[in-house]
Amino acid sequence: MLKFDVGKIMIKWLYLIFCYIGLHRYEKVDISFSFGPGGSTETIRCKDCGVKKLRKKR
Ligand SMILES: [Zn+2]
């Protein structure tokens, strides 16, 4: 017998649908400081689909 949490899978699917329409749940994974003209950047990653983005800090 397979035992798994249907509710959790449903929520995961819901989040993936949100990802699909561009609503990612980002978390900060890395912040790099630089003193050049580019300024500091932080790397953010989506908790659900794993997409990474570089964001400039002002
Ligand atoms: Zn996502």
Image (spheres, rainbow, N blue to C red):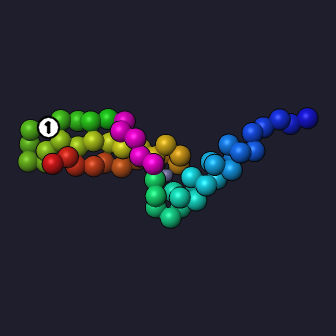
What is the total number of numbered labels drawn onto the structure image? 1
Magenta highlight range: 25-29
User: How far from the left and from the top, in percent, is residue 35?
Assistant: 9, 38
User: How far from the left and from the top, in percent, is residue 34?
Assistant: 14, 37
Say if disc 1 is inside 8 Å of ligand 1.
Answer: no
Report crowding for label 1: few under 14, some 14 to 19, many 20 or more residues within 10 A (C-alpha): few
Q: Residue at point 23% right, 36% down? A: 32
- Residue that extends furthest to the front in the rendered view of this protein: 7
- Asked if residue 34 is among those painted magenta in the image, a careful observer would answer no
Amino acid under label 1? Ser
Residue of label 1: 34
- Asked if residue 28 is among those painted magenta in the image, a careful observer would answer yes
- Residue that extends furthest to the right in the rendered view of this protein: 1
Q: Residue at point 41% right, 46% down? A: 26
User: How far from the left and from the top, in percent, is residue 38?
Assistant: 13, 48
Q: Report whether 15 appears left or right of 35.
A: right
Q: Residue at point 46% right, 53% down? A: 24
Identify the image quadrant of the N terminus.
Answer: top right
Secondary structure under tag 1 reads loop
Q: Main secondary structure of the magenta part?
A: strand
Q: Report whether 15 appears left or right of 29.
A: right
Q: Report whether 27 appears left or right of 8.
A: left
Q: Report whether 28 appears left or right of 1.
A: left
Q: Nearer the viewer, residue 25 or 30?
A: 25
User: How far from the left and from the top, in percent, is residue 14?
Assistant: 61, 55
Question: Is residue 31 depicted above or below 22 in this figure?
Answer: above
- Residue that extends furthest to the bottom in the rendered view of this protein: 21
Q: Residue at point 32% right, 35% down? A: 30
